[in-house]
Image (cartoon, grey):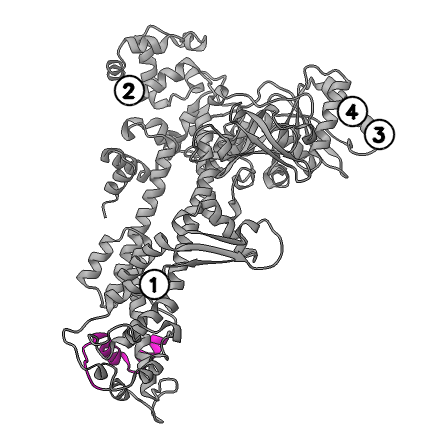
Amino acid sequence: MDIIQILTQEFNLKRQQIEAFVELIDDGNTIPFIARYRKEATGELDDVTLRDVFDRLTYLRNLNDRREEVRRLIDEQGKMTDEINAALDKAEKLAEIEDIYRPYKPKRRTRAMIARERGLEPLAEILMAQELVDGDILEIASEYINVGDDVKEGLEVKTAEDALAGACDIIAEDVSDNAEFRKAIRDVTFRDGTLESKAAKEEDSVYRLYYEYSEPVCKVQPHRVLAINRGEKEEFLNVKIDPPIDKILAYLKRKILKELPKRPNEVDVLGKRSDNEASELFGRFVSENEQSAVCRDDVSRETFSITTSYVEAAVEDSYKRLIEPSIANEIRGELSVVAEEQAIKVFKENLKNLLMQPPIKGKVVLALDPGYRTGCKMAVVDETGKVLDSGVIYPTQSDARIAEAKKFVKRMVDKHGVTLIAIGNGTASKESEIFIAETIREFGFSDVKYAIVNEAGASIYSASKQGAEEFPDFDVTIRGAISIGRRLQDPLAELVKIDAQNVGVGQYQHDVNQKRLGEALGGVVEDCVNDVGVDLNTASYALMSYISGINLTVAKNIVAYREEVGAFKTRKELLKVAKLGAKAFLQCAGFMRISAGKNILDNTSVHPESYAAAEKLLEKLEYTMDDVNAGKLVLLKEKAERADMTKLAEEIEVGVPTLRDIVESLQKPGRDPRDDIEQPVLRDDVMDIKDLKPGMIMTGTVRNVIDFGAFVDVGVHQDGLVHISQLADKFVKHPMDVVAVGDIVKVKVLDVDVAKMRISLTMKDV
């Protein structure tokens, strides 16, 4: 298997791109580093494409490992043939390799194994040969009767019928183990079978849509597969795959049953027995309504062997007892894998957009973690995220408590210059929002706005070891408020402290492979953190641990170094940090920023390995480092293009992609790519779901995107659904083609169900 060639074809890339990427990965380089600083080698492939290629590379390598393992296992049994070798070489999927290995795989004790131990394999071979045209099959089978005191218990063959039954068991297992048959049956079941589900209990549930559900297997949408799987797991649904049985049996019989070249006497075909006697005998192997075609009066029996009927019965038994349930499980497994990958893809995209939401800089934030009985926990954090004050108020209790709470908020606003209030969206969020809106109006806080913040995972962080390390002097509940305030100031820096699976933007995330999900989401966080970069002198160890080449231990060592020695003045100082060697420095340095260091280049995404090139570029275009510091390079790109980028790249000894990146970085030192994204919606008044009327046009924030639509926050504490059919005036294949988490969108209210707290929205004609 030429893995490079497969990847080249599947991703429609050049072979040298794939070869360069594989070599870089195998040398220990990270995907963020390759995507940013090795563009010449990969042809400027972005991090998303590189991760897709890496995932496929990993699968194909694992497939090859399994291929060789199966080859070894079969060879050790002395059963390897040229045909098996060729079939293994040709297999492109794990299921195909497992089908090849199936006959040689150690099994639990089966009926066929017992039959072989009884010495019935020769009889099975006689039946399968289908060459006998006359004689009595029972007489032939009686030769295999084996009883007596010297026969091991359980291995007796007491009658000819027992011998025939055992021989048919052997045939059935051999048919079931045939890789060619299984592949064909799997393909036709997927193409022509249906997935069905029915209610398992007589009670209403969220799975009511699937109480009488049937859909072609090949057309089932991924989110339906996951919903059905969950319904089955929770015992609300009975699920099965209904295969095209007639088509499959016809295929098997066409492949296995043999016609004889001559037409023997009809009586001889049935072993000198009447039709009634034959039917009674065959009934041991197939039920009355499933009698084989050979036995029915409407089909000519004259061109078949006297053993063909037994083979046909064994084939039917093989499919219904062994193949059908196995293939159904395999197909449902494949459907689940595809569905899980789709759910992970949606989660990844949502997470990326959530993490890359723009920070709100330069604001002192008052954060509320809402609650009823225990009150609202509050914390004030300054522009850098430092905690200035904290407390607890009770805005949902008596009038006296509410008045006292308002005075507390006023005191915090006046004392610390608060201009932004962050309200968690959990329990009592609506009441807290009403309270804050009333307080803003009552005290005339014209400069104060508020925002509802998704608090998913805040309680997990507040009770975590990291939360305790960061804020040892604060109560667990106050830590939750701090997290809510900080995630409004800088979503990326705060959300990386929480397991990505708990940030509230997934779809069936608890129903997918958790290891695979964790790996995929970890890659998203890594890409986002490296895309933005981190301030070496202020970033938490949690944030830095996602930087290319840095693990948690090294990240903690960086924090310990700056606490002991003081702020980093240059990137090169990183080499003094314990366990951070030259290789790690190469990977991480370009993503670390020093905002007030000795070298302005340390506050850009220019990698230290390209500093000399950057200096040459400035010199050739008649600029200085002072010009970079003063932000006087607005015409740098224009001058570089006039000088011919290709020629310029040769002169400063870098590739054109690297030159473009250097130019962009020099023009905007300290640039944050999130600054180009629209800011979150800030409010100073409150609305209720009862205030919504059909036809109202509103501005909202996309909170979650799923396969069938998007949920949009329009400021009434209940997100509205924009169904996929309402996202645009054109056909939308997937909601992510139109919207993303964090997008600010215009929507129109279609319908409001106050009792069920459901809001239907549209983005058409807005």
Rendered location of residue 61, percent (x, y): 31, 48
Residue 246: mark: 1
Label 1 or label 2, whichever comes before in sequence order: 1
Which residue appears farthest toward the left when viewing the image?
261
- Tell me the SS state at disc 3: helix
Could you tell me which secondary element the residue under label 4 belongs to?
Answer: helix
> Are there few (<14), some (14-19), or many (20+) residues within 10 Å of tag 2?
some
**Lower position in the chain sequence, tag 3 or tag 4:** 3
- The residue that disc 3 covers is 399
Residue 499's image quarter? top right
Question: Would you name the residue on which mark 4 appears?
Answer: 406
Q: Is residue 409 above or below residue 129?
A: above
> Closer to the observer: label 3 or label 2?
3
Q: Secondary structure at mark 1?
A: helix
Mark 2: which amino acid?
Answer: Val
Give the percent coordinates (x, y) of residue 96: 30, 56
Residue occupied by mark 2: 656
Q: Is residue 40 above or below residue 210?
A: above
Q: Nearer the viewer, mark 1 or mark 3?
A: 1
- C-alpha span from label 1 to label 2: 62 Å
Q: Nearer the viewer, residue 620 or 40?
A: 40
Q: Residue at x 36, y 9 (%)?
A: 636
Tell me residue 332's x, y (percent): 42, 55
Crowding at label 4, few (<14), some or many (≥20) Cα neighbours within 10 Å? many
Disc with the residue nearer the chain's start (3 vs 2): 3
Q: CA distance from mark 1 to mark 4?
A: 75 Å
Q: Nearer the viewer, mark 1 or mark 2?
A: 1
Packing grade of label 1 (10 A; few <14, some 14-19, many >=20) is few
- Labels 1 & 4 near each other (Cβ < 8 A): no
